[in-house]
C-alpha cells in the first residue's frame, strides 16, 4: 500500500479523536473498516482553513488535543491531494494544508537540505512528514520532495499573517 492509497482508503471516514503530541506534531484517529487508522503529522508547517478561507488553526497556534479536536473530530475526510511540496486534505467544512518551506526545513533538520546526499542517508522515519498507521501495525510514510513557496498559494498571505501574529509581530 502506498501513502496515497492509505489516504484514499480514509475518504468518507470520520475523525474520532485528535491528539496533540508536541510542536507541530499531532495524530488524527479515523474510524475505518477493520478498525481504527491513525494519520500522524510528524513535524511540518500546516494550516487549517474553513470553506471561506479563514484560518482556523495553524502549526504555530497554541496547540492542544482540545484545540485540534475542536477543528477535526467528527469531520469526514472528503478528498486528498498529494504533491511534491504539499499535502491537502479536504474535510467537511475545513481544508488542511501541509507544507515545508526551505527555511523551516533547514531549521528543524540542522541545515540538511531536502534531497541532499545527507538527507537521503537519514532513516526513513526521520524524513517522513506523515505516517499512516493501520492495524495490525502496518505503517506507510510520506515525505516532501520539494519546498513550498507561500507566495504561490492562495492562503499563503493568511498563514504568514497568523505566523507573524503568533510571534508577537
Image (cartoon, rainbow, N blue to C red):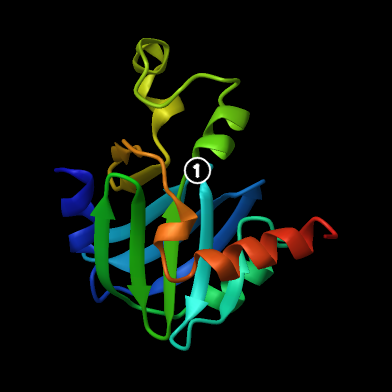
User: Which quadrant, please, contains the N terminus?
Assistant: top left
Structural crowding at the residue carrying mark 1, measured as other residues with C-alpha within 10 Å and reported as few (<14), some (14–19) or many (≥20): some
In this rendering, position of residue 74 left or right of residue 139: right
Q: Which residue is mark 1?
A: 101
Q: Please name whichever residue, 38 or 153, is drawn nearer the observer in this view of the structure.
A: 153
Would you place residue 108 above or below residue 97 in this image?
above
Q: What residue is drawn where x is 34% and y is 16%?
A: 120
Q: Outermost residue, right direction?
A: 168
| Residue 65: image location, x then y, percent | 65, 63
In the foreground, 104 or 127: 104
Residue 29's spot in the image, x, y percent? 43, 61
Q: Nearer the viewer, residue 140 or 110?
A: 110
Residue 143 x, y percent position in the rendering: 35, 37
Residue 56, image x and y in percent?
A: 59, 76
Q: Which quadrant holds the C terminus?
A: bottom right
Q: Is residue 160 left or right of residue 46?
A: right
Of residue 166 and residue 8, the one placed in the foreground of this image is: 166
Assign a secondary structure to mark 1.
loop
Report whether 148 appears left or right of 1: right
Q: Residue furthest front?
A: 151
Residue at figure coordinates x 62%, y 61% from the top left: 160
Identify the residue shown where x is 58% and y is 64%.
159
**Is residue 73 in view from this perspective?**
no
Camera sees residue 28: yes
Q: Is residue 38 above or below residue 69?
A: above
**In the depicted structure, whether residue 169 falls above or below residue 130:** below
The residue shown at (52%, 57%) is 46
The quarter holding residue 162 reads bottom right
Q: Is residue 131 above or below residue 162?
A: above
Amino acid at each position: 500500500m502506498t501513502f496515497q492509497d492509505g489516504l484514499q482508503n480514509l475518504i468518507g471516514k470520520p475523525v474520532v479523536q485528535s491528539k496533540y503530541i508536541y510542536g507541530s506534531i499531532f495524530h488524527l484517529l479515523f474510524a475505518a473498516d477493520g478498525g481504527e487508522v491513525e494519520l500522524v503529522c510528524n513535524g511540518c508547517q500546516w494550516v487549517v482553513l474553513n470553506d471561506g478561507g479563514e484560518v482556523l488553526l495553524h502549526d504555530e497556534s497554541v496547540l492542544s488535543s482540545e484545540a485540534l479536536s475542536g477543528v477535526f473530530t467528527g469531520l469526514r475526510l472528503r478528498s486528498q491531494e498529494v504533491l511534491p511540496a504539499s499535502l491537502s486534505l479536504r474535510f467537511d467544512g475545513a481544508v488542511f494544508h501541509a507544507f515545508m518551506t526551505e527555511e523551516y526545513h533547514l531549521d528543524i533538520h540542522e541545515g540538511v537540505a531536502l534531497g541532499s546526499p545527507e538527507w537521503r542517508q537519514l532513516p526513513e522515519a526521520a524524513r517522513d512528514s506523515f505516517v499512516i498507521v493501520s492495524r495490525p501495525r502496518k505503517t506507510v510514510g510520506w515525505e516532501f520532495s520539494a519546498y513550498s513557496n507561500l507566495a504561490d498559494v492562495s492562503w499563503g498571505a493568511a498563514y504568514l499573517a497568523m505566523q507573524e501574529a503568533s510571534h508577537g509581530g
